[in-house]
Amino acid sequence: MAIVDTSVAEAKKILDKGGLIGLPTETVYGLAGNALDPVAASSIFEVKARPSFDPLIVHSSSLERLSPFIKDIPEEAKKLADEFWPGSLTMVLPRSEKIHDLITSGLDTVAVRVPNHPLALDLLSQLDYPVAAPSANPFGYISPTTAQHVNDKLGDKIEYVLDGGPCQVGVESTIVGFPEGVPTIYRKGGIPIEEIERVIGQVKVNAQSSSQPQAPGMLHRHYAPNAKLLLGNIDEMIEEYKDENFVTMSFNKSFPTVSEEKQFKLSESGDLSEAARNLFKTLRAIDKLNPSFILGEWMPEEGLGRAMNDRIKRAAALG
Ligand code: TXA
Ligand code: MG
């Protein structure tokens, strides 16, 4: 198992010698390595069992520190960085030659982000290089929102997890690109589309799934628990599946005929931020019970609910 602790100095030591660490961010934990070191980058793909056509996000502590890796920045991107960095926004921008093809999977763009987490910012500001960090889960599995989650699935493959406590947002960053100059959402995430549009006006949304996507966070089966996730009216499904080994996962509803330990509510008080924070944690907790079915429902399609519905859809492999 990896060592799980709060020492930024220890995390830096491992990164400096080309190793990988679990990195806390406000969205999910990342599996971080020196983005300028091709050996570290290829070990990220290996540890995650991630296909090499799926490019990585490059993280640093400020736009200035990321700028050597970016060729040019559209006006809208500057506005978004001003407004949301540090924060749960990733931008896909034209890349410079300084970033390796392994990181970008050979694309002519690079994804960049300044995460909003005090330990991550402290660490990133002390490094002489940016870090590449995909979510620290085995490819296709549920993203980690605690240091323990990272240790559970990847602990035998990495040395150290920097423990920054439970992630405060709980779903991955929103990804925005600018193909042909048009602001386009590639992945719904921690910054709601409404917020982005408040700053730069209307954006295009191109976060559809497929089995051969350009951005593989868009793979139609992703974030998937072992149990089969079914979506619909939970009350009706309870009737239909009464002879099966199931649990429920609702936004905030209770079901009197189901025993307490088989009911999972994402937010008792019906708060979307709290529900987002609890989503991946709940799916992992459910997997430990090993049910055959998860009877779930869609979240309200607004704010963070949109990012949650995207993850729920993929977890159910509805495509
Ligand atoms: O919240 C997050 O973004 C977390 C934390 C750790 O920062 N990271 C994360 O990374 O979710 P990952 O690798 O699980 O997802 C990155 C997504 C992938 O779907 C990838 O295809 C897309 O970003 N991506 C990376 N570079 C891209 C590029 N140049 N063009 C289009 N999509 C890109
Ligand atoms: Mg991921």
Image: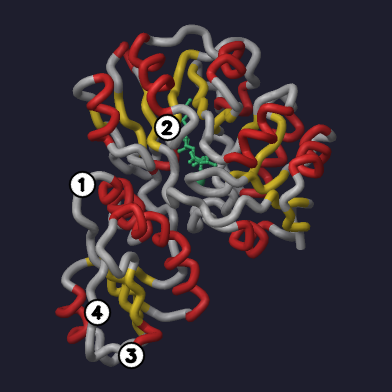
Give SS at disc 2: strand
Residue 259's disc number = 3
Going by the numbered disc 2, the residue's amino acid type is Leu
The residue wearing badge 1 is 302
Q: Position of residue 155 (x, y in %)?
A: 71, 59
Residue name at image x 33 percent, y 40 percent: 188
Gap between marks 2 and 1, in whole Å?
A: 17 Å
Q: Position of residue 293 (x, y in %)?
A: 35, 77
Residue 230 appears in view: no
Q: Nearer the viewer, residue 118 or 203?
A: 118
Is tag 1's residue or tag 3's residue first in the polypeptide sequence? 3
Count residues near mark 2 (Cα–Cα under 10 Å), then give few for <14, some for 14-19, many for 20+.
many
Residue 63 appears in view: yes
Residue name at image x 56 percent, y 33 percent: 56
Residue name at image x 58 percent, y 36 percent: 52
Residue 89's disc number = 2
Going by the numbered disc 3, the residue's amino acid type is Ser
Q: Quadrant of residue 274?
A: bottom left
The residue wearing badge 4 is 254
